Amino acid sequence: MTKKVRVRFAPSPTGGLHIGGLRTALFNYLFAKKHGGDFILRIEDTDQTRFVTGAEEYIEEALIWAGIPYDEGPNKAGDFGPYRQSERKDSYATYITTLIEKGAAYYAFDTPESLNFHRTDHESKGKTFIYNAHNRLKLDNSLSLSKEETASKIATGTPYVVRFKTPENTTITTSDMIRGSVSFKTDTLDDKVLFKSDGMPTYHLANVVDDHLMQISHVIRGEEWLPSLALHTQLYQAFGWEAPKFAHLPLIMKPTGKGKLSKRDGEKGGFPVFPLTWLSSTGYKEAGYFPEAVINFLALLGWNPGTEQELFGLDELVATFELERVQKSGARFDPEKTKWFNQQYLQMSTAAKILPEFKKGVLAAFGATAIENKSDRVLETIIDLVKERATFTHELIELAAYFFVDPTSYDQKALKKQWKENTPEIVAALTEIIKSQTDFSSANLELTIKNYISEKSLSFGAVMPPLRLALVGALSGPHVFDIMEVLGKDRCIERILALGNTAKDL
């Protein structure tokens, strides 16, 4: 019988969730849903010294905003809880005892001062100190001490840790779904601490035990955990458990392609590296990105669908995603490409979806009077008229400003160029034409004014630029007649007259 796919995203609450972590969560989610499995959130808070208040809540909020909900987790109970490792603390001691009894782990009583002495001594001789078979019998642990001495130290409360006993002169070979066969020589590995002196397990022990107890079938995590694969593989073997399948995702690299993307890169480059604002760092949400756009560009950082397609909805990603198409090498982060994705999603978004944020921005910029006579339908029309030139929703406010406030100044260079000797006569004629219209639709206005241009044998360049300047204040914006329909007859006349008064001084 095929084992049900169960994956976990297991962040530590030591700070804000970096987008690299969000991508790890996304790839876990996509893989689980592709195979009809479960996506679990587990908070790995065994290191209480690095715990940051608010970090766990931030992680959950980021996942919710991104639209990648978990099936089991701290606030969504399942059959394998608790989902915070600190709440599972009492269960780990049993497994440590098992490893010690099997000879796979041992007590170590070395003081920090003693370990520092050995490191310094090795460095003075041009060597690297590794706590393993090379020197563990010379150190203060239950392998170098008698059973009686060990028992006495424990009984008298001497602080200790428990270390894994790495085998000597052995090559550990395992497989990775992305990288293929992976081998490690044990002589280069140290005897990692599994249990700390404060009674808490380290990440390594808790991770393996919890993955086993939660029936995790696949461990999909960042490349930075690849060196830990040797220890984790050995722990599964020591316990006699079937190991999950592993997949280590490539790093997200700096825009230059050299080095791992960091918070500092975002600060220097002026782009977010967090999904939501964390401390002084602006998040993608607050910068105006659609969560769908963030998910889309993250999916393509290290994964290739095998086609030229770049825009994917979440359901499409689930259907298309394959771990085997994840690359081994690092994925270069491109801030400009992330903006492109957001622009695409803005263009694909309906005006109705954008309206609440747009209305909030208009109120903040121009006050309640700016929209008091404008229905939601009119506001949606404005959004559709200007969004083609926007990358972010907040840019729509500036692009649409002339729909809400009359121009107070004009593009002087354009005005001087476009205001000819016969322009006052044309503007006066346009004013009368506009006054006489009972049908103020864009289509009728276009037909009527074009007929006037034809009848008077005028050029479009003599009529349309001054009209646009009057309405917008610049030679920019969407179709002039669409602008006129939204503004209405009275507003158009007022603006044309205002331009005429300003141009008198030229």
Image (cartoon, rainbow, N blue to C red):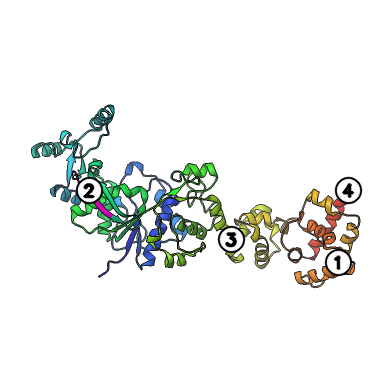
Distance of label 3 from label 1 (alpha carbons): 37 Å
| Residue pointed to by mark 4 | 505
Q: Which residue is mark 3?
A: 346
Q: Secondary structure at mark 4?
A: loop
Mark 1 = which residue? 453
Instruction: Report the mark closest to the observer, 2 or 1.
Output: 2
Q: CA distance from mark 3 to mark 2?
A: 53 Å
Instruction: For label 1, count other residues whose C-alpha is less than 10 Å away and answer few (under 14), some (14-19) or many (20+).
Output: some
Inspect the image, locate mark 2, and give the three-letter code of the amino acid beneath it. Answer: Thr
Do residues under tags 4 and 1 come within 8 Å of each other at their CB atoms? no
Q: Is residue 404 magenta?
A: no
Q: Are marks 3 and 4 in contact (CB under 8 Å)?
A: no
Of residues 491 and 496, the one nearer the viewer is 496
**How many neighbours does mark 3 have within 10 angstroms: few (below 14), some (14-19), or many (20 or more)?**
many
Q: x, y percentage for residue 322?
A: 39, 63
Q: In the image shown, does 70 or 246 lie closer to the viewer? A: 246
Query: Residue 100 location, x and y as percent?
Result: 15, 47
Residues rendered magenta in the picture:
168-174
Kind of element beneath mark 2: strand
Q: Amino acid at mark 1?
A: Ile
* Image location of residue 378, percent across then percent down: 68, 66
Q: CA gap, disc 3 to disc 4?
A: 42 Å
